[in-house]
Amino acid sequence: MIRIGIIGCGYWGINYVRVFSELPDVTVACVCDTSEDRLRIMHRKFPYVFPTKLLEELLADEQVDAVVVATEASTHYSITKACLLHNKHVLVEKPLTTSIEEGEELVKLAEEKKIKLMVGHTFLYNPAIRKIKEYLSDDDVGSIYYLEATRTHLGLIRKDVNAIWDLAPHDISIFSFLLEAQPFWVSAVSGGFLNNGRPDVGFITLGYPHNILGHIHVSWINSNKVREISVVGSKKRIVFDDLNSMERVRIFEKGAAITGEADSFGEFQLQLRDGDIISPRIDTSEPLKNQCNHFISCLSNGRHPLTDGTNGLNVVRVMEAVNASLKQRGAPVEISRAFVEVSRVPVEISN
């Protein structure tokens, strides 16, 4: 039996308690939050879970094997470090930290203590994203030209990070997962229209190997809620729409590619493909539950997490380059080469 502690009783904290409570051989032993109201709400929903306002009390419990850190991003470093120092395995919500130095310290600490450190990049456990990965692995799309992501909504404005740090890590992690590569450079611009000193809209362009481009649009102030990713290739275009419960993935068998030799005028023949639109069957399992299952499996069987600390650190490296580009009004910034190779080993997810 694995005993879990949950730190942070907001939206994600409550969901983590629900999901872990449904898993076999797992017990949610304790929840921690500084808010009396949140602890009261949590106790009403889950009366069997011990509530505490003191992080030290949770960490002192030697029977707690692992913790979930579901607090504000600015607190991830200090709380995760305290958990690791108390020999607790950690699943921390994205982003891992808000600086490269802090992320590197946590990854090194987890390695030294031989403790599992996993980051909650939940979309990598989404069956729809994994279906797209299958098509890309089979070279079904042809040569990939670019990826495009739009993540917009109105409201849910964070107090500790801006819209780019809040939303873009999702798509950066997805792009790297699908391409099995990290970006070389980034260019980013933003706008702060709510006058709170933090950007509430951002546009990010990323350069990947083989001249593949990535583009991300994030916003807190767009009344049209969108959660969409497109992969455009020479043979097909694949679209993921997270808000379309009926057709989360659609494959457009349409594309354009240059073929043949140049004629006497130095022109190449353009081949256009026009075919069907396919909506493949997608597994209906819950991404958060898949992620939690994977975390427990890693603890039980010694498996290496798909979204381990280094995976989360790679995303933080990109985000720091985004910050640097923002300060230079969109000038391209090269990203630190201190990446590790993205894992190509498939990770099973279960219902």
Image (tube, helix red, strand yellow):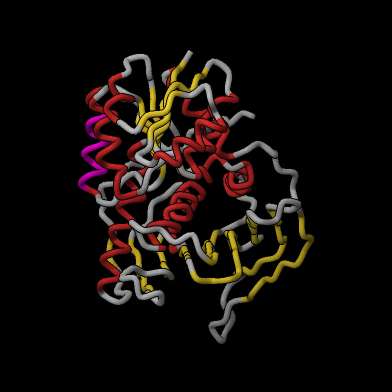
Give the residue at x 38% y 52%.
182
Numbered label tally: 0
Q: Nearer the viewer, residue 350 or 29?
A: 29
Q: Quadrant of residue 185?
A: bottom left
Q: What residue is drawn where x is 64% and y is 57%? A: 241
Q: Quadrant of residue 15?
A: top right
Q: Depth check: 333 or 254 in front?
A: 333
What's the magenta bit mostly, secondary-structure-wise? helix
Q: In x, y percent, where is residue 164?
A: 40, 62
Residue at point 41%, 69% (across, down) = 200
Whether 1 is drawn above or below 169: the answer is above
- Would you say 19 lies left or right of 113 here? right
Asked if residue 191 shows in the view, the reply is: no
Tell which residue pokes out farthest to the right in this image: 276
Residue pictured at 48% horizontal, 66% vertical:
220
In this view, 257 is above or below 170:
below
Was residue 246 drawn as part of the magenta stretch in this picture? no
225 sits left or right of 160 in the view: right
Taking depth in this image into account, of 90 and 313 the one nearest to the observer is 90
Examine the structure image and report whether residue 109 is included in the region drawn in magenta: yes
Residue 133: percent from the left, percent from the top?
58, 46
**Residue 252 image point, x, y percent:** 71, 61
State the extent of the magenta-drawn residues as a range.
Answer: 101-110
